[in-house]
Image (tube, helix red, strand yellow):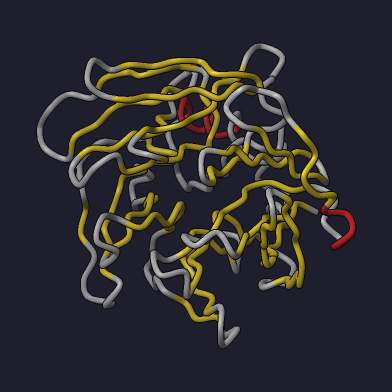
């Protein structure tokens, strides 16, 4: 099983959803198996005359266990990420870039995944595994005040905000689908199927991956009006970020980069920093920091 598929931890789930869950876990898990062991690294990024340099690698989690899904704050001063500190529950943690201090952000009896900053930066949205095992979107104010459910839609894996009230959601259908959703009462619309987990906004367009029968990823875009979708080109891996019109992708121990022409060039060999298998990547808003998930 490809370790790039999303993690779900559920309890007392209906049998058909248990079977679906088993198809989307990072590794082939059973009830007694251990959770994936991942770390988050933080690197400095600089660019001179089109040449990139990565330096000062720091393992900001450096522990045994699952730490994943990093997201930079709009001001780049801290990172939110998903962390599992026991075998039953995940919470969102915060890492301060300057002080290097880690604090727990969500403290609930449920599990939270996929921290994503909402428009304005005063709230984040997360996928919450509720007590009945439904996976719905919730809003958590950065101030720490009471969270609230965003909408009733179930079986959400990942999400990406297109605007204040509309977003693309990775839905745990079979095959997985990217659906266009409003936070009101309108019905979701399917944008694409057989999608990967990575969904990004860049220059007012939504970029996402699709995967073929051989698990090969391709980059696609979605835009309005007219629900315009277009397949762009194949990718070395599933995880990517956008930077000034360039696409940066992780694959194995390497980062690759290309213009939107599909011609990939090796950017960095992460094994120099001790990262042999890179997963998710996140870029700070100013482009000077990169968070990389290392899968052990």
Relative to residue 295, is residue 257 depicted above or below? above
Residue sitting farthest toward the bottom = 99
* Residue depicted at x 51% and y 33%: 18
Please identify the quarter of the rendering in which residue 13 is found: top left
> Picture coordinates of residue 231 (x, y %)?
51, 15
Please identify the quarter of the rendering in which residue 236 is found: top right
Relative to residue 134, is residue 238 depicted above or below? above
Q: Nearer the viewer, residue 34 or 156?
A: 156
Q: Nearer the viewer, residue 149 or 15?
A: 149
Residue sitting farthest toward the left = 185
> Picture coordinates of residue 226 (x, y %)?
23, 15
* Residue depicted at x 49% and y 46%: 10
Residue sitting farthest toward the top = 213
> Picture coordinates of residue 149 (x, y %)?
21, 53
Please identify the quarter of the rendering in which residue 257 is found: top right
Q: Nearer the viewer, residue 231 or 40?
A: 231
Residue 119 in view: yes
Q: Is residue 239 left or right of residue 104?
A: right
Residue sitting farthest toward the front = 49
Q: Quadrant of the C terminus?
A: bottom right
Q: Is residue 184 left or right of residue 217?
A: left
How many discs appear?
Answer: 0
> Picture coordinates of residue 221 (x, y %)?
44, 24
Q: Quadrant of the N terminus?
A: top right
Residue 1 in view: no
Q: Is residue 210 left or right of residue 148?
A: right
* Residue depicted at x 60% and y 56%: 68
* Residue depicted at x 89% and y 59%: 272
């Amino acid at each position: 099983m490809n370790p790039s598929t999303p993690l779900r931890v559920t309890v007392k789930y209906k049998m058909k959803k248990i079977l679906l869950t088993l198809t989307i876990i990072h590794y082939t898990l059973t009830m007694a198996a251990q959770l994936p062991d991942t770390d988050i690294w933080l690197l400095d990024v600089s660019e001179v005359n089109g040449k990139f340099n990565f330096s000062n690698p720091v393992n900001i989690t450096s522990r045994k266990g699952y730490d994943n899904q990093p997201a930079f704050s709009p001001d780049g001063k801290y990172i939110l990420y998903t962390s599992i500190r026991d075998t039953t529950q995940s919470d969102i943690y915060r890492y301060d870039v300057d002080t290097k201090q880690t604090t727990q952000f969500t403290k609930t009896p449920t599990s939270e995944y996929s921290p994503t900053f909402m428009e304005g930066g005063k709230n984040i949205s997360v996928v919450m595994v509720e007590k009945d095992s439904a996976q719905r979107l919730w809003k958590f104010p950065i101030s720490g005040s009471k969270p609230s459910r965003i909408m009733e839609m179930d079986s959400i894996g990942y999400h990406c905000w297109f605007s204040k009230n509309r977003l693309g959601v990775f839905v745990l259908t079979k095959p997985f689908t990217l659906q266009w959703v409003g936070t009101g009462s309108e019905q979701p619309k399917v944008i694409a199927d057989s999608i990967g987990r990575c969904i990004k906004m860049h220059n007012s367009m939504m970029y996402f991956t699709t995967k073929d029968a051989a698990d090969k990823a391709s980059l696609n875009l979605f835009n309005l009006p007219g629900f315009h979708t277009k397949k762009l080109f194949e990718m070395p891996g599933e995880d990517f970020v956008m930077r000034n019109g360039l696409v940066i992708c992780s694959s194995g121990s390497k980062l690759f980069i290309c213009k939107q022409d599909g011609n990939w060039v090796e950017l960095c060999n992460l094994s120099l920093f001790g990262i042999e298998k890179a997963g998710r990547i996140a870029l700070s808003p100013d482009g000077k920091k990169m968070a990389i998930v290392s899968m052990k």
